[in-house]
Image (spheres, grey):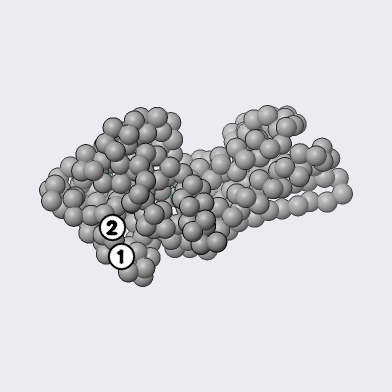
Amino acid sequence: MKIGIIGYGQMGKAIERVAIARGHSISVIVDPKQGYVLDELSPSVLENTDVYIDFSVPEAVVENVKMISAHGKSMVVGTTGWYEKLGEIEEITLDRGIALVYSQNFSMGMNIFFDIVQFASRVINHFPEYDIAGFEIHHNRKKDIPSGTAKKISEIVLKNVDRKKKATFFPGNRKIDSEELHFSSVRCGDVVGEHTLILDSSSDTIRLSHSAKNRDGFALGALVAAENIQNLSGIHTFDEILKIVLKEAL
Ligand SMILES: NC(=O)c1ccc[n+]([C@@H]2O[C@H](COP(=O)([O-])OP(=O)(O)OC[C@H]3O[C@@H](n4cnc5c(N)ncnc54)[C@H](O)[C@@H]3O)[C@@H](O)[C@H]2O)c1
């Protein structure tokens, strides 16, 4: 496939590396820092691409989707922190007849972790002795707090554990209520991404942890999404793509 990279930062570079290793080519790179601004590229350059992968900044996503969909091209969006615009983006994709796959976390391992969290939450729902909380650690350049993945893990817990009613990411200086799911964030150095869920009773502690070792796992997931986007239209999550891929593999 001919892949267009939007955002040539740490993730954009990982996409390039993993795409080439999987036999794809890079048709265009869009990144203002590199001097390549989307609305200054010629239509022929933009059209010479099968699918675009966006790992840029949250405030650029809506404009990027508008520009790319105007050329009838589908997109994989790994950028996080724009989800309040989901409705607007869904309308654009339907209007233009393109497909867009997004995820707060494209890592295959993390998607397995989501299933483990769901299973643990369902079990612990029957054992009120256990309290539940979480924390995440990321590098100090990360723009959003909490991480999109922390929000997703919290959503899974809240959906499956009746005694937890809401996630609290910024409690301030006070006691945590027993109905709150406390999920805290730390920013430090060059940590790629760690998420831990703690299930704690008076007799033991269960810790479920996922640590990303590098960015290639995210890039691989985004490329798997790109490779499976051609027959889709409208907006889809990576979970849906994984289900399609696994159905074919099993
Ligand atoms: N969904 C996932 O699995 C996943 C995994 C890792 C990172 N992310 C997210 O991906 C995004 C990028 O992460 P990163 O670590 O590569 O960040 P980064 O800061 O290294 O790179 C971002 C790049 O986007 C460029 N950029 C800024 N405005 C742009 C625009 N209008 N168009 C195109 N490019 C633009 C910047 O110049 C920069 O080079 C963040 O939102 C991060 O949270 C998601």
Q: Nearer the viewer, residue 65 or 74?
A: 74
150 over 16 or under it: above or below:
above
Q: Nearer the viewer, residue 124 or 201?
A: 124
Residue depicted at 37% across the width and 39% down the height: 234
Outermost residue on the right side: it is 203
Q: Which amino acid does label 2 sit on?
A: Ile
Q: How far apart are marks 2 and 1 (CA)?
A: 7 Å
Disc number placed over residue 24 in the picture, else none: 1
Q: What element carries label 1?
A: loop
Labels 2 and 1 touching (C-beta < 8 A): yes
Determine whether, in the image, residue 221 is placed left or right of residue 170: left
Q: Quadrant of the C terminus?
A: bottom right
129 over 52 or under it: above or below:
above
Disc number placed over residue 3 in the picture, else none: 2
87 over 81 or under it: above or below:
above
From where the camera sits, is residue 85 visible?
Answer: no
Determine whether, in the image, residue 175 is placed left or right of residue 96: right
Q: What element carries label 2?
A: strand
Q: Nearer the viewer, residue 240 or 180?
A: 240
Q: Going from the N terminus, do you reach mark 2 or mark 1 first?
A: 2
Residue 2 placement (x, y as % from top left): 26, 59
